[in-house]
Amino acid sequence: MLAPALAVAQRPPLCEAPAPRQLSFETLQGDSQLDENTIMFEAGQVDIALGDEPEAAMSGGVLVRRGDRLAGADEATYEPTSQSLTLIGAVRYEDPQTLVTGSSAEFAYESGRVRFDGAKFLLDDSQSRGAANVLEINADGRLILDEVNYTTCPPESEDWLIEAGYIELNTNDGVGRARNVKLRFKGVPILYTPFFSFPLADARKSGVLPPVIGSTGRSGNEFSIPYYWNIAPNYDATITPRLLTSRGLQANSEFRYLTERNNGIANVEYLPQDSLTDSNRYLLAAQHRTLFDSGWRNLVDYTEVSDAQYFEDLGGSLSLSSITHLNRSILFDFYSDTWTLFGRVQDYQTIDENIMPVDEPYRRLPQLRLLGTWPDVIGGLEVGIDSELVNFDREVGVTGWRFDVAPQIEWPIGGSGWFAIPGVKLQHTRYELENTAAGAEQSPTRTLPVATLDSGMIFERSLRSSSDRIQTLEPRILYAHVPFRDQSQLPVFDTIVPDFNLVQLYRENRFLGVDRVGDTDQLSLGLTTRILDVNTGQELVSATIGQARYLSSQQVTLPDQPAAADNSSDYIAEVRFLLYDNWNFDIGHQWRSDDRGTSRSEARIQYRPQVNKILNLAYRFRRESIEQADVSWSWPLTQAWNFVGRYNFSLRDEEALDQFFGLEYETCCWGVRMVSRRFLSTRDGTRDTSLGLQLVLKGMSSVGTSADTLLESGIHGYSSGLE
């Protein structure tokens, strides 16, 4: 809801950034486009021995160039026959990806191999570095090292270090492979493996991902080791064994694919014989999309779980535990300049045991929809049609087909700073029903004319206080007339009364869905004002207020709901603006002018003076439902320490709903997060606790829980500085 601050201070660096690496051998002269097979030498002194085995000895400082490779040393020996060069003393080698120094080196130009003794190396962006007893560079871009150490920490630090008997660094595919590997953190070995592979850049590769370690009150301690399988450039999978000490071993898998026309993701989770429930538990999920050349599109969305408590026990968040229905649908649609076609079959799995069968959503078997629009037909008239055919099915209650068609005509007119759109529509609905009550009509119909007039104006002026600011004033009026038709005999398949908001204010039907069309004779009145920066186009202030006035009584209702007796709707207002520099404020309020007062209210204020310095305060209220206060923050205590947290409190229930507190510690090349959380984990109010610890090795990986995911979702505007 909050707009970003106009000016955000930059985060101070934790350590001095390394200077960009530049080629050092600027004294080497010659054409920069030399042939790859041409070798150029510069030396203080050259001694050449002629004979059957000619040899050249160079001293007094030696510089060698071949293509984009440069080398230098105190002394060198060159053998023309074998095309090999041996460098001795203060050896330095550079190419576009690598900088290597050592005590001696051998260049075999025939094979393109370079071998260093006592080498130190620096890769690409001056962040990846290490040392080796022997380092070999091959023409195909591979670096092979014996008895080596490797890190991305700056030169003055070795807080984390990989030690290996053998490492191969492939600068072409961005992957490193190592054998007999130890990972040391602060000098302490924390990992050993006979084989290990790791990225040098963002290349996708198969291998073990960092383990996840954590604990929760409901499932005990958690330990999982994901394995990433790079099947092909457009296919991959992640397989994750997950040990929950109180429940057992769960197997999770995720498969992703991407082709020219198709993409999707499939998930399978399976926990055999949960120790706490004594049952097999699973989740199946798939999302798929196909784009056809003809303009058609196919979407598949399917989710199924073994039991109603699956997300509560194994999901790990309040948002997941609040899910009541899981969607299962197959959709085909087509878009053109004039027509939109839509076809779907849809079902739901209801996982909230408190929902009675009579209240479960209907299956759509199938749903077909056709929309057409023809602008500027005659004299600026726009003609359109919206039609739908649906078969609603369920085990209990009324079922059957519903056909709805609504042709309409509009005449948009306007000019500079104003518009008016009169329109008429005729909506006809017919049902073919089964399982109706005795004596109820099985083929009811409804036909309704709808007339609207939508109009508005835009006024603009420059502010006296600043020539770089303009203010707009935008009044809007919608008149809608829908006559009364008795609709009490019609079933309710998918129609609800939506929350009142600024979008709903300018709709002619107060219901969402076509089972009910509300009778009305109303004026929807709204006024918006904005303050804009003419140089950047940024909206500094936006404020809107509106209300609907009913000129006649409204009689159409949903079953078991009384008819509305008010002659006006609630007032609704939204305000958002930049308070001052790094302060943002956003509020939405809905209220009545009588003694009933506020219906809904939401407000949020954010202070963000720096990228990593955020404070959010929020309030939510809905009459007879919720009243919550929320505070979240990410605040540096020192240059290295950062305090993060969130406290979400229900004022209505006088209890905390979700709270977590954590510390982040960051250095040049590593960081750690520690987060403790207590939250509602089930619909019946059961609480859970968790403790997360995440160690981040910059440029390498992380070990522990995915604490950053929790922080990003719980703290508005949070962005991690550890990765």
Image (cartoon, rainbow, N blue to C red):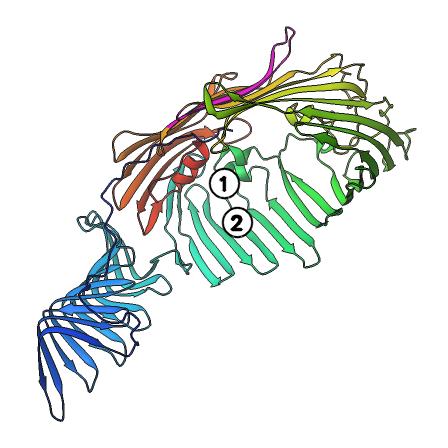
Give the x, y percent position of residue 185: 23, 48
Taking 99 as reference, is 601 above or below it? above
Q: Quadrant of residue 61?
A: bottom left
Q: Is residue 135 visible?
A: no
Q: Work out whether mark 2 precedes mark 1 in sequence or the reverse, and give the earlier one.
A: 2
Image mark for residue 269: 2
Look at label 1 and name its amino acid: Leu
Residue range corresponding to the magenta coloring = 581-608
Front residue (pair 271, 661): 661
Question: What secondary structure is marked by label 2?
Answer: strand
Asked if residue 511 lies left or right of residue 287, the reply is: right
Residue at left offset 87%, top offset 23%: 486
Asked if residue 554 lies left or right of residue 447, the reply is: left
Q: Quadrant of residue 134?
A: bottom left
Residue at left offset 77%, top offset 38%: 395
Residue labelled with disc 1: 314
Residue 573 colored magenta? Answer: no
Front residue (pair 503, 170): 503
**Is the residue marked by circle 2 packed among few (<14), some (14-19), or many (20+) residues within 10 Å?**
some
Give the x, y percent position of residue 57: 10, 79
Look at label 2 and name its amino acid: Glu
Separation of marks 2 and 1 at Cα, in angstroms: 10 Å
Image mark for residue 723: none
> In the image as oriented, which residue stretches furthest toward the bottom?
52
The C terminus appears in which quarter of the rendering? Answer: top left
Give the x, y percent position of residue 100: 20, 64
Most common secondary structure along the magenta stretch: strand
Question: What secondary structure is marked by label 1?
Answer: helix
Give the x, y percent position of residue 310: 55, 40
**Is the residue marked by circle 1 packed among few (<14), some (14-19), or many (20+) residues within 10 Å?**
some
Asked if residue 12 lies left or right of residue 439, the reply is: left
Asked if residue 101 lies left or right of residue 240, the reply is: left
